[in-house]
Amino acid sequence: MPLDYRRFNGPEDSVSYKRYTNKYYKGYDELYKELVDDKGRRKDGRALDEARSMCMFFARTDLISQAKGSAYIELKKTKVVCSVFDPREIPHQNEFSQLGQLYCEVKFAPFSCAQQRRPHVDAEDKSLSVALRQALEPTVCRHLFPNYQVDVFVYILEHDGACLAAAINAAGLALANASVPMYDIITSSSVAIIGKKVFVDPTEAEEHLAMMSPETEGTNHGIITMSMLSELKQVSDFVQIGSMDIECVTEAMDILEKECENIVPNIQKVLVHNVVQSFNQRKQLEAEAKEREIALNVKMEEWKKLLNAG
Amino acid sequence: MDKEIGKICIPGMRLSLSNKEFISGPGTYELKGYIYATLAGILKMEEDEKTKATIISVESPRTPSVLPKAGDIVTAKVTVVNSRLVQCMILCVGSSILVRPYKGVLKKEDIKSTDKDRIDPYKCFRPGDVILARVLPMTEIHWYHLSTAENELGVVIAVAEGSPQGISMVPISWSEMQCPKTLVKEPRKVARVIPENINQTMFKDSKESNKESIDVK
Amino acid sequence: MAEIYKLIHPLKYFNDYISREIRPDGRKFHECRNIKLNVNSLKTAEASAVVKCGNTTVVCGIQLELASPKAEEPDFGYLVTNLELPALCSSKYRPGPPSDHAQVTNYLVSNIIVNSKCIDLKDLCIVPDKLAWVLYCDMVCLDNDGSLVDACIIALISSLKTLRLPTVTYDAETEDINVDPDIRTPLKVYGLPVATSFSVYKLPERDILITDPSIYEEEMCGGIGSNFIVCSNQSLLCGTQKFGGSNLPPESQEEALKISRDRANVVEKVIETCLANNCEINEI
């Protein structure tokens, strides 16, 4: 890898200390056993079909003062920040385009995964960025800003599975917070499939195992992420990785549709709270401005009197 | 609490039927006979005087992320002046502030409505002036065409050459402005600002002189 | 209306405030913004800290790796600090490789940490010439609202203070390395460097020193970043930077040094309280 002169680089041959611990190498079966206990509970105590959205979902807006709109979403350990900026000129554009564009960028923090991530843009970042853009495009009224682009930046602080779904949810919230006109609220969810088990809203360990191909052939495995426009009942993005049969996919779609709808009230709550807050804030500011104006007018009258007298 | 503010809308919320009585306004869109919201904000229902129809719109607490449209009045800062055109950065559309400035261009023939062939841009604008202008239909990518060919449009705030920053000149005629401190006179295409619209804080320093001129009239 | 005024008459708007001895956000000239600190909130990093100075938000995470020391310094470990200014933290940054400003700030932060000698790199060496710790300290700015260096140093120091190194056994003959992550020893941190940013604003009559400027104030005082950064490590200076063309009278400089000393005490208290709370939580 070429040396990056813009940053400080560590020694080239450094390796994570975790490689030397006893628990580093594990077989497929061992990992599989760890995921679910005898009672069908997952490592963090959830049932297989239980998403983190119910109790461990945390979201808020207006986190970043410098951005037009921003959002933060936490699914237990997965932590995602998103900021949205006003439309700007599309660089190096020569043709007139009727529809505005979305520029999406997903980045992982260097410390977001168990292994250190080098700060270069890699293929995973790029593929997530493209998936995010495709998911968001149908929901934004792009005809309102022809020839311009809206920037959507997503930063993943901690990655513990379902990061594309979290990124889409955060971006949808941030876009609404930035008052970018949107057709509908967008929500997203993902599942990991290992054999007959369907892990809703998977963690990193579950995703990791779902991506490994098991030794026995013909077993379903993979990850599906789907995003939906809730009111219009439209699927805006559907990504399936891994190998599985068709029944499995259709079954997963039903589950995902339900999960996406489950998140909607959460998002609505945040948005309504946000509107109430900003209007109250504005009211207060207006009241203060009015006070000042009255004070100013009084002064003006005094001046007028003085002028008339002199 | 909610009653004080009004009805809260969020994107995708179905607001009403779309027909002769209800028309979709800003912040909403129409689909399959219904009106939906596109912004998170507060529902506004206003009656149009001519058609008696109710216009449904959503007011957002922030400036919506939309761009200047043809016909809008914008506030812009002049950046470049040459013999053919004037370039500027658009700062505000109407009363809403843009977070990102957009580029605008004012062609020589669009500066004044009279004497079009004898306009000299150097005698109308200087870099740094704040102007009011109207947006013309967009023909070029990334450049908004502007026009000041109206009495109410043109320079509102300008600083004379050599005067300290922060002291703006006072209009003395439709084509000249004067610095209250150094008494330097400079030519400008002055906007006739309607007195009600004068922002008192904006003209705090020149208030006295302004008032004197009003009194004289 | 005030917003429009600010946009059209930026200089006058700012002057109006400053000449009345107050800043646009209501602070006095030497009033600092509140500091909020949280440690060990990220589980993928070995140690982490989130700090908020006003709106400025910086997250720092440390990850551990092992490597053989440099041949010329066989008993030294590595401390690699990097600051990311991603495009999401301000509308002024573009996506892509680090900007000049990011590189300069990054260099400044690493310089302060190295020069204050708060980490002895010899502590990071496990077996001379064979094995040493590499500390990757990555700072990410999520919201840049001025005085970036201050926030970075707080985040970095508090995460270094919470870092606990796993024990390593090294077999000299077989060169086998074994790490036990369950038994950990805290890293020694000597001293506590605290940076304080200032901006110098030129009024026609006099120069005014502003402590802990926001990004808007930094911009009004000429360009990106603060004009003047003083870094003190327990009442010892460990770095003073003065940028930009505006001149600074000697009285202001003395004043700045005094303020930075006071602020260092405040920040120290904040960090100590936060770490103490964190320990309590861990014990429970």
Image (cartoon, grey):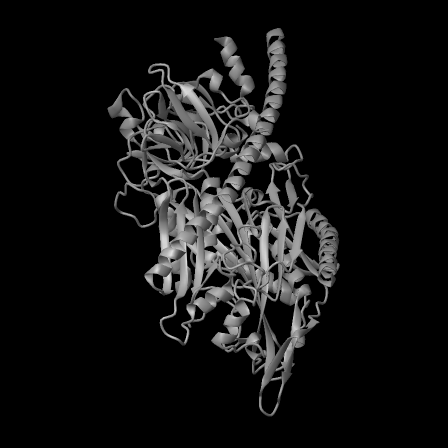
If the image is split into quadrants, where does the N terminus of chain B sit?
top right
State the residue at coordinates (62%, 50%): C52
Where does residue C169 sit, x and y in percent of width and height?
64, 83
Where does residue B195 sit, x and y in percent of width and height?
47, 16
Q: Is residue A158 above or below residue B16?
A: below
Instruction: Out of B140 and C57, give the one closest to the viewer.
Output: C57
Res B110 quadrant in image:
top left
Residue C245 visible in the picture: yes
Where does residue A32 sit, x and y in percent of width and height?
50, 71
A235 sits to left or right of A20: left
Q: Is residue C125 above or below residue A287?
A: below
B10 sits to left or right of B144: right
State the residue at coordinates (36%, 74%): A217
Instruction: Out of A222 and A180, give the one closest to the viewer.
Output: A222
Total count of labels? 0
Where does residue C218 sit, x and y in percent of width and height?
57, 45
